[in-house]
Amino acid sequence: MRRSIPLLHLRHIRRQPLRSALVVLAVGAGVSLAVAVFVDQASLDASVSGFTRRLAGPAALRVTGPGSHGGLDATVLPAIERVDGVASAVPVVQSVTVAEDGAGRRMLIAALGVDCSIEKVFGPVGCSPAALASVGDDAPPVLSASLARRLGPTGVVRTDVSRLRVRDALTVARLDSFNQGRVAVLPLLVAQRVFAKVGALDAVYVLAKPGVTARALQARVAAAVGPWNQVLPATEAPAQARNTGAFVPTLLMIGLFALAIAAQLVYNTIALSLEERRRELAVTGALGGTPRLILTGSLVEAGALGLAGGLIGVAGGVVMARPLVSSLSYFTEHFAGLRLSVHVPVGVVVGGLLAGVAVAMAAAWVPARRATRLDLSSELHDQARRAETAPRVSYRQGAVLVAVGVAGVAATWMGQRGGALRAWQPPLAELGMLVAAFCFFRAVGRLAPGVIQLVARLRPLRRGPARLGLSNLARQPKRTSVMAVAVGAAVGLACVLGSLLPAIGRGAATITTAAGANRLWVSNLPANNSGNIDAKLSPSVEAALATLPGVAAVDHGAFVAVLGRDVGLLGVNGVEGVHVPWQVFEGRPGTEAFGRGDVMVGPGLARALHLRPGSTLRVPGRTGMADLRVGGVWADPNDLGRGITMRRDQLERIWGPQPVSEIYLRPATGVSPEELAGRVQAAGLDPDLLALTPAGLAESVAGDIKGFLDPFWALQRGLLLVAFIATLSTLLLVGVQRRREQGVLGAIGMGPRQLAAMTLVEAGAIGVAGTVLGAVASVGTYLALSFVSPILTGLRPPFSFDPTAPLAYGVLTTLFVLAGAALPAWRTARLDVVAALQYE
């Protein structure tokens, strides 16, 4: 068998280089999308682990408070130091802040506040307690050498109370390897003051005495600090840094879909290759070759091509992962100051190679099994070859798939009713979305041959190359289905994204207009996802804003992320004055609840903890546990629906003073928000100050959310590539199969241009049919997505399908398909008629 397999199978890889290349490209295109998503996840894991490990050093444990902003009361430090088995306790203030260069370019960095006990973690650095005590609040921080170069002498590091100049800052080259150099270090007491964390810490790193295990020490420290604080292994990643919601799973689903299309392309190629070797395989059987030899050889051949495709897919996936990692880095930078870099672990490389092999071998299994059941006598006498007859086109399977897809949409609707507060609703909605998307796009392939057959009845298409091309598509529905699904997926995803962006914009406008309530929003940070950034408006700027002419009153907002053992990760908003009037699912309206001292909770939190109006929600505070009474459940999308909204003064009683995350200025009578915005900007209170009217705030939020969709656009372009390869490979292979038929057409007078036109007609018909059916499928998929969106993301964009999207993206995709058909058309036009007539 060792000698027979290379002779009978592997030599065909060299003899048919174009066909082999097409298999490799098909596998590579599918694998690259899946690998990109795994590299994305691996980059998150590696970057977060590296950041945490470098900061922890030899520490065994990390003690944190429940709040994201100075959540650990400083009085726990001596309590930790007294625990038996503790060698040292190292206090740390850890913030996310903004660094600016002289040209105003901004970046998010990690800012650390430490005292000389940090030498227990990083080793001797020449720290002097007396020198640290003499540092003023306006002194430049210690910077990494690379950050100092990027900021330049006129750069600044912003805090909650001031802007620290970096001129003459001490630089430490060792910090360049920490968080890609995006780090600034301040004395502990200074950091507590400038980041509004006086009397509070973000973490205490605990070093164990020799012979004391981390597990035993963890129990003792936990008993000393109280159940409201967290005692974790020092290298365990913060929950905030991994909070990416449905981002990665959704990307993975798209990547696996592309991999399934690649498998179908490999199936077509292997089936055609084995079809052409029927006589050769029959001779092998007559000479004693066993079915096992044929099966094993075919799988080895497919596996070799799949391995090459997997290698290309790994390389392509690494390239494609870069924009995905950049988008994911947005989350980690805003929530933890952590900058992600691309990491490609060996496991992902090996997994990509194995995926290529597995896809190719799985796709080759059915044609290989079919080849083992040849009728040797008929094949040797050339009696098994028969002309293809056009199968009867059936709409039954397509109709069944559409019906199941509609049932999936109905399931998503049922799953989201009433805020999806019942435990059974989210699984039903998520399953319904997957079923709807799969069935609708699967139906594209099943219905495409029938649509093409109907189009072929049009009078202008009943003659010449058009008739032959459309007949070829109807005669081979399986191959037509593969190309149509590839086209439909690319167009469908583009239609969903193209409709989602305007819907998000309108949804953001509605929400922010309600939140603004004719007030002027003022901040020096972006309007979205900036709650964890410690570079907010200083108290002096706040006071100056309140005294501006035309300001009748000032409403403040505060935010804190809370992590508890029993409640998980929460987002808590403290409001003053007007609040967003979210739809109330159960209970009292927000204004009434806040007046009674109650809180409003999002649907995700209510679902997870079985909360209803009147329930008691026990949350960890800075100095102990706090009991909150739930006034109602409403459609708050913050933190994926796991948010709590309460009065600002109530928030600060539980988690301590918090810097103001946003300010709303109420204009005086006769003063418009636009006029007041001009006065704020003219006052020149802060060079980074933003003053946005409700309309401007809506535009800012929508623009920020738009960036979340960039990775999906990247995968959509990857699907365009898959559609291109699907068309190219399928038409090339079909051209080989029809070589004799094309020779007959040439012999009876069809010229090269007409032969080429026939191939291009096929591609154009696939493009049009795939576009139309893909657009229709995208409507159902988008409807299912809009229903399930509140569960996955907390936010429901209004349903608004863009009717121009199918036209714009359909034309683009059809051009890609025609480009893929260009080579097959060129080869057909150069057909040698005599050689083709002799082809078997």
Image (cartoon, rainbow, N blue to C red):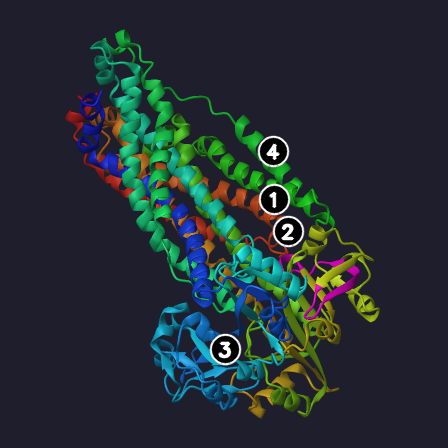
Q: In this view, does 464 lie to the left or right of 639?
A: left
Q: Does the magenta stretch include residue 610?
A: no
Secondary structure under the numbered disc 2 in the rendered image? helix
Q: Is residue 277 left or right of residue 148?
A: left
Mark 1 or mark 4, earlier in chain: 4
At which x and y percent is residue 90?
Answer: 52, 72
Label 2 crowding class (10 Å Cα cut-off): few <14, some 14-19, many 20+? many
**Label 4, label 3: how far apart the Cα atoms are:** 63 Å
Residue 405, image quadrant: top right
**Circles 2, 3 touching at the beta carbon (< 8 Å):** no
**Label 1, label 4: how far apart the Cα atoms are:** 18 Å
The residue that disc 2 covers is: 791
**Circles 2, 1 touching at the beta carbon (< 8 Å):** yes
Q: In this view, does 542 lie to the left or right of 148?
A: right
Query: What residue is rendered at 57% in x and 56% in y?
Result: 216
**Label 2, label 1: how far apart the Cα atoms are:** 8 Å
The residue that disc 4 covers is: 403
Query: What residue is rendered at 45% in x and 83% in y?
Result: 141
Q: What's the residue type where badge 3 is placed?
A: Val
Mark 4 or mark 2, earlier in chain: 4
- For the magenta stretch, what is the residue range? 620-642
Secondary structure under the numbered disc 1 in the rendered image? helix
